[in-house]
Structure formats: structure tokens, C-alpha cells
Image: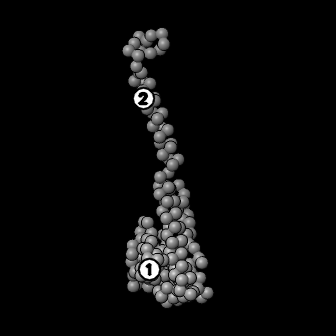
Amino acid sequence: MKNRKGLSPNGGFTMIELIIVIAIIAILAAAIFVAIDPARRLHESRNARRNSDIATILEGVKTYQADNDGAHYSTVAALTNGNYYTIGTCATGGNTGCTAQTTQAACVDLSAIGTGYLATVPMDPSTGAAAKTDYYMMKDANGAVTVGACDTEGGGAGGAGTAPVIKLAR
């Protein structure tokens, strides 16, 4: 029997009231989880890291060039103008695994450029390794260098959708 204020005799909530409140909280939590879309946020954060990494690589290569009277680092100078190369220590096999750009079989090794320019050569946050960083480089006939990310991730719901092109040139 309920008292005048509508509470049960011992002053607590009924089981039905508790179940309804828990169900409402669960529905709100599920809606917020879907709205936040953690998979998409992870893809976006890895793409931001890729963007930062290629900027770091390009800055190191161009700083080396500026410090050496316009001469490129030896492995960059040896590149065939207009061809794309995977950045890494691999001797061959650099042309496998780069989806954004077709690359040559040889890699361009920047690992010995010096800590004043690159403390370490950045690697893709998902699939990069020292042998193949999953970043690529191209030098044109005018000495301009382009650096890009091989395997970007889509920016749509759940990380699906068209992957952005991440590359810089100077």
C-alpha cells in the first residue's frame, strides 16, 4: 500500500521504476557512443599523425638542403627525377604496399641523414616499419621534393569512405 506521497511504505523505488531508469540510461549511453564514433576518431588521429610525419620528413630534407648550399642529401640526390620511392631501409621491394602512389622497387634511405635533421625517420602509425615506413618521396627536375603517406584511412562513419590524400611538396 502506498502512502500519500506515492512512495512505497518503506520509502524506496519500485522495481519497475528502476528498470525504466536503467533502460533510459542505456539508450542514452548507446546514442552517445554511436555519435562519438570511436573508430572514426582513431582513423582521424592516425591521419593527423601521418600529416605531421610527412611534414617532419620534408622539413628535415629541406633543412639539410638549405644547410648544404642547395645540395640534397646523397640518397635524395641519387633519385631519378619524377619517380616515386618508398622511404625506408629496404634495398628492394619498396614498390609493394603503397596504395596512394606507385613507387619504384628501391627505397630511399634517410636513416643516416643526421639527428640534426631527423632524429628518427617517422613510420606510419598503423603499418610502418624501418624497412618500409609507408611514406613515399619524389624529387622533381627543379629540386622540389614531395613527401606523402601511402595508406591513409577513410574519414566517414566507422572510418569508411574515401581516404584523404596526404602529401606535401616544397
The CA span between labels 2 and 1 is 64 Å
**61 versus 14 height, above or below:** below
Q: Quadrant of residue 105?
A: bottom left
Looking at the rendered structure, the secondary structure element under dot 2 is helix
Using the rendered image of the protein, determine whether residue 133 is visible from the camera's viewpoint: no
Give how far across and how far down residue 45 sits, in percent: 49, 60
Quick one: 47 or 75, which is closer to the camera? 75
Image quadrant holding the N terminus, namely top left
Colour treatment of the image = one colour
Give how far across and how far down residue 62 sits, in percent: 55, 79
Using the rendered image of the protein, determine whether residue 119 is visible from the camera's viewpoint: yes
Q: Is residue 131 left or right of residue 39?
A: left
Give how far across and how far down residue 148 sits, in percent: 53, 74
On residue 19, the disc is: 2
Quick one: 60 or 14, which is closer to the camera? 60
**80 versus 86 height, above or below:** below
Q: What is the residue that sits farthest to the right in this orientation?
A: 142
Q: Quadrant of residue 91?
A: bottom left
If you read the primary sequence from the N terminus, does the residue marked by circle 2 or circle 1 appear first? 2
Image quadrant holding the C terminus, namely bottom right
Residue visible at 42% across and 24% down? Answer: 16
Quick one: 155 or 168, which is closer to the camera? 168
List the residue tagged with mark 1.
114
Q: Quadrant of residue 14?
A: top left
The amino acid at mark 1 is Gly
The amino acid at mark 2 is Ile
Residue visible at 42% across and 29% down? Answer: 19
Looking at the rendered structure, the secondary structure element under dot 1 is loop
Q: Are marks 2 and 1 in contact (CB under 8 Å)?
A: no
Residue visible at 54% across and 57% down? Answer: 156
